[in-house]
Image (spheres, coloured by chain):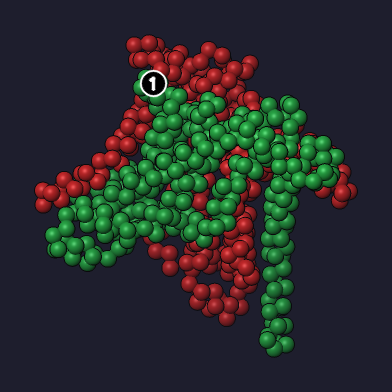
Chain colours: A green, B red
Amino acid sequence: MSMTNLKSILKKDSRLAPGYILLLIWLLFSIVVIGWIFAASFSTTREIFTNTLFKSGIHIENYWNALVHHNFARYFINSLIYTCTSSIGIILISSPAAYVIGRMEFPGRKLLINTFLVTMSIPMVMIVIPLYAVMIRLKLIGSMFTLIILYIAAHVPFTVYFLTGFFSTLPKELEDSALVDGCSLYRAFWRIMLPLAQPGIITIGIFNFMAIWNEYFMALIFANKAELRTLAVGLRSSIQSMRYVGDWAGLFAAVVIVFLPTFILYILLSQKIISGITGGAIKG
Amino acid sequence: MKSKRKFIMVCIAPALISFLIFFLYPVLRTFLISFYKVKGIADGMSLWEYTGFGNYIYLKDSPLFIQSFINMFKIWFIGGIITIFFAMLFAVILTSGVRFKVFWRSLIYLPNTISAVALATMWTQYVYNNQDFGLFKSVFRALGIHVLADIQWTSPQYIFISMLIAFCFGSVGYYMLILLAGMEGIPKELYEASKLDGASLFVQFTKITLPLIRNVFRICIVLWTIAVINFFVWAQMFSPWPDPNTITPVYYMYSVVFGVGTEAIPTNVNVGMGAGVGVILTIVVVVLYGVVNLVIRERKLEY
């Protein structure tokens, strides 16, 4: 790199200095907060209060405490079951609908798309009361099944909407040739179109996974019993008791347990996640 | 042809049925319940007691409910300005040619991927903590800014603003991504041509960027509105029991229907009143959409 080139780069960067400063403040704040929470989760409560983190080495027992004594192992497994089952269920219900809406003409098609669009802005408070009543009458309160069905139903409209755009961009020839070859419509969809839509399905799948993992309102209402709780609801119900017994180190370990899975997923897949979000929102 | 029609029906049915059962039916029923006094959430219609607009009149005269609405409006308006301003600022910074753009973009979006419960716990138990280890406390003390170091962030006086800051911090990244995608769609030639004409960065922003991302901006406001209407988890994390400083309509509804008794909220549950809150919020959404559509008209052609 020649000297003049370097100079022009430096000059350009100095114009951007205020921007860099703002970004660095954001970076510093994020590192300090996340770093401190991590450090505190491996220290003792006494060290937290005296600002001497790590003084007596690393205390993994905070995690053991949170997982075993405060039931976070159970919450973790629950969250995993809710999230995985409903993420798959959403795709199974949404992709055939999205395929048909995206590629075929039929009466009511436009109405269907608009209905799904409007559904996304209905406040959750409008639907929880009757659903709770129904679940009680069906004796489904107290079963993990309840929250799974609710998560599936709640995410189907957006997923159909997202995948419709995806299916409609696939080339038409593939389908036609499959049908000429005597493939049934079902088979053409399952064997040819669904695999082709895989990138879109994975994107929306990750997106739904994170949304459900972090969901709180419905989980609080429909699964607020020790054996049914999700991590988010479990954390919130444990905060008061952990503070009361003075187990602050355990509290921060619990926070790490709650955010680590999506944090790691995000670090590994941030490009995919970000493209999914902008793709979905801009089209809307 | 017949088999094709059957195929379409088979494919649509599950999604349509889930919509009918889990959206259409509950919405209609919530609307209906709001005109009745209902003691138990699972009570059948025979136990409902018709009150006309009774629930709405009660809500209108309830100071706590009115306060919850004021809080929500403040979050929508003040929080909206803060969030969209910073989202826009970061989007402009990232499109101005900074290095490691992809990294910065991921970093600013990061809080959106963390559970709001975990995020709120980090804020209330660490950043705002009034003990010596609290982040704001120790940083402002080290910098010698005692005015800020002495603030008790979670005291009734400051709790609303603390909650708002934390919520906005967690939201900025999402709106930044959307604005960024809009800005990246603007042809580069426009900027180059205006640069030749001697336009400053500020002029470029107000004359090119802003008018061309109009529709994206509108989407941001709509999404922000939905987020604020459903505002609940942050209010509950900052105030474990309903508190006039932080309560929002959804928190109010949750307390009324699922029973968190406080002095201001009647202990005898009335599900109809909770339903009334839902109906009012739905009307607010419709009205706000109307206002947004009037103020920022959609334009088909962007460039």
**Residue A248: which quarter of the image?**
top right
- The answer to whether residue B216 is seen in the rendering is no
Q: Measuring 43% from the left and 50% from the top, which residue is drawn there?
A: A205
- Residue ID for mark 1: A139
**Residue A239: which quarter of the image?**
top right
Residue B67 vs residue A10, the one in the foreground: A10
Where residue A214 sits in the image (x, y, percent)?
53, 41
Where residue A230 sits in the image (x, y, percent)?
53, 34
Q: Answer with left or right where residue B109 lies relative to residue A195.
A: right
Where residue A222 sits in the image (x, y, percent)?
47, 28
Q: Measuring 35% from the left and 53% from the top, which residue is drawn there?
A: A163
Q: How crowded is mark 1: few (under 14 residues within 10 Å), some or many (20 or more)?
A: few
Label 1 element class: loop
Total tally of numbered discs in the picture:
1
In which quadrant of the rendered image does the C terminus of chain B lie?
bottom left
Q: Is residue A16 above or below residue B167?
A: below
Q: Answer with left or right where residue A107 lies relative to residue B260.
A: left
| Amino acid at dot 1 | Lys
Where residue B67 sits in the image (x, y, percent)?
61, 28
Residue B180 vs residue A264, the one in the foreground: A264
- Using the image, name the chain to which the residue with label 1 belongs: A
Q: Measuring 16% from the left and 54% from the top, which residue is drawn there?
A: A184
Which residue is situated farthest in the right direction here? B144
Q: Answer with left or right where residue B148 lies relative to residue B166.
A: right
- The answer to whether residue A273 is seen in the rendering is yes
Which residue is situated farthest in the left direction here? B2
Q: In this view, does B14 lie above or below B197?
A: above
Q: Measuring 82% from the left and 36% from the top, which residue is drawn there?
A: A46
